[in-house]
Amino acid sequence: MKITYKAWFILLLVPIALFSCNDHRLGGSLSPVRLRLKTTNDGTTLVTYNYDSQNQPASITRNQITSSIMHGDPQRVLTDSDPYATNVFYIRNSAQANSTVIVFPPVLSNTSFLATEYGRFNTGKIFFNVPVRKYTYDFDTSGRLTRISDFSDAPDINGASYEYTGENITKENVFTSAGHGDVYTNTFTYDDKINPFYGLLDPQINARLRFSRNNILTLQSAGRGAVPNTTYAYEYNAQGLPTKLTTTVNGNQSGITTFTYESY
């Protein structure tokens, strides 16, 4: 999706979304049609989602690079010790034995937690001794995301705090390098249709998409390092799901993204 977000911020928002939602019935809770997102294509990157029998993303392929999500490690593919056997693992570029892995708690719910990214040995096992990065997720008492931080040490902290209106993030306060880099605020408006990224585990989808029920219509940004003001226009299918997104930045069309779905 051609959205002009800061690259670091897209990548730090790791693969956790609406933890309490296992049935991603995008047609709505009363819909006889059970749909889930299958592909997105912005003309440059084709993203394909594959799911397990529990309707959880099992792999995500961007062009030719596939990353995997494991819910537990009973076969000890990644770990040798019992304490980690039931964790959730996101394996970046899983075809590469020594790629990094982000380790999440065994039970994912809308409560605050820490996730840690590690390297791997050439055997594929996780090297737990030296963390690569750490990620904190904070939620309020209603289970809404309030803050994400990404860091390796104290001076190197990136993140954002969030404010909601209903079930949508309407304000995002972004900071990089512990506030010594970019510091800016994004505000958003939404349509009333279901957002296909809502509740979807995907590390390269921004939190404002994964934690908001509806689709963003406008982005207004202000501050040091602010991103361009952007509008989003959608075409929908019979279930009210986006099939086409046209992105306009500062009045100029910047990209088109198409969506496909599959029933299950």
Image (spheres, rainbow, N blue to C red):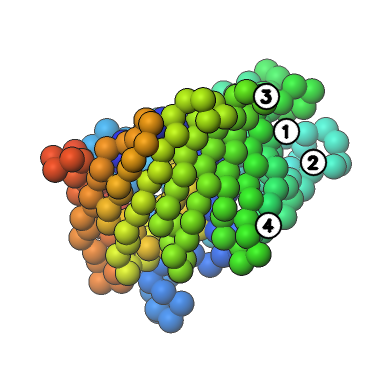
Q: In this rendering, is residue 54 above or below 75?
A: below
Of the image marks 1 and 3, the number of the one nearer the N terminus: 1
Marks 3/4: CA distance?
Answer: 23 Å
> Residue at 70% of width from left, 42% of height from top?
114
Q: In this rendering, is residue 122 above or below 3?
A: above
> Residue at 47% of width from left, 61% of height from top?
164
Q: Is residue 65 visible?
A: no
Three-letter code, disc 2: Tyr
Report which residue position mark 4 lands on: 111
- Image marks 3 and 4: residues in contact by CB distance under 8 Å: no
> Residue at 24% of width from left, 64% of height from top?
236
Marks 1/2: CA distance?
Answer: 9 Å
Three-letter code, disc 3: Asp
Of the image marks 1 and 2, the number of the one nearer the N terminus: 1
Three-letter code, disc 1: Leu
Can you tell which quarter of the image residue 130 is in?
top right
User: In front: 220, or 256?
Assistant: 220
The disc at residue 78 is: 1
Frontmost of labels 1 and 3 is 3
Q: Residues within 10 Å of mark 4 (few under 14, many from 20)?
A: some
Place of residue 93 in the rendered image (x, y in percent of width and height, measured from the top left): 53, 29
User: In front: 176, or 203?
Assistant: 176
Report which residue position mark 2 lands on: 84
Place of residue 209 in the rendered image (x, y in percent of width and height, measured from the top left): 42, 52
Position of residue 103 in the picture relative to residue 39 (left or right)? right
